Amino acid sequence: MSDRIRDFTQFRQRMNERILGQDNQVIRRFFALDTQTYKAGALDVKTKEMLGLVASLVLRCDDCISYHVAQCLEAGVDEDEFFEVFSVGLVVGGSIVIPHLRRAVDFLDQMTAKGSAGGDASGA
């Protein structure tokens, strides 16, 4: 596992535990809502994660992009599908998405080189 993947995963897990350890129902409910949103329903998990990745690209949130890249891999998104997702995010978000697209592809390359897809169910 690359340092970037390990650091991202460990930080995210540690901070989610810290945040969810507080007695704050608003935060807990929002995290639960996020988790419920990405469960299979009328749309399957794979489709929802691809939508999440497009939204994250357009919003230019690198942590969210990394999270959804990992979740997309876990859901079975292949390289051709990733690049179609990336193209939608780029067209919707414009050229300002390009630096985030670079980091997304780099994160994807790192994850697939090590075969270490994965995440947890506590939101982006």
Image (tube, rainbow, N blue to C red):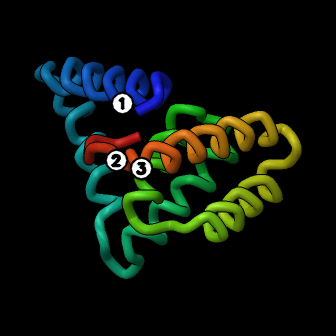
* Residue, far bottom: 42
Residue that mark 1 sits on: 9
Vertical relation: 72 (above or below) 70: below
Instruction: Give x and y (percent) for residue 90.
Output: 79, 53
Q: Earlier in the sequence, mark 2 or mark 1?
A: 1
Secondary structure at numbered mark 1 = helix
On the rendered structure, is 117 left or right of 87?
left
Distance, label 1 to label 3, CA atoms, is 14 Å
Residue that mark 2 sits on: 118
Secondary structure at numbered mark 3 = loop
Quarter-wise, where is residue 23 in the image?
Answer: top left
On the rendered structure, is 92 left or right of 53?
right
Vertical relation: 79 (above or below) 34: below
Q: Earlier in the sequence, mark 1 or mark 3?
A: 1
The residue at 43%/68% (across/down) is: 76
Residue that mark 3 sits on: 115
Mark 1 in CB contact with mark 3 (< 8 angstroms)? no
How dense is the environment of label 1, judged by Cα within 10 Å: few (below 14), some, or many (20 and up)?
A: some
Mark 2 in CB contact with mark 1 (< 8 angstroms)? yes
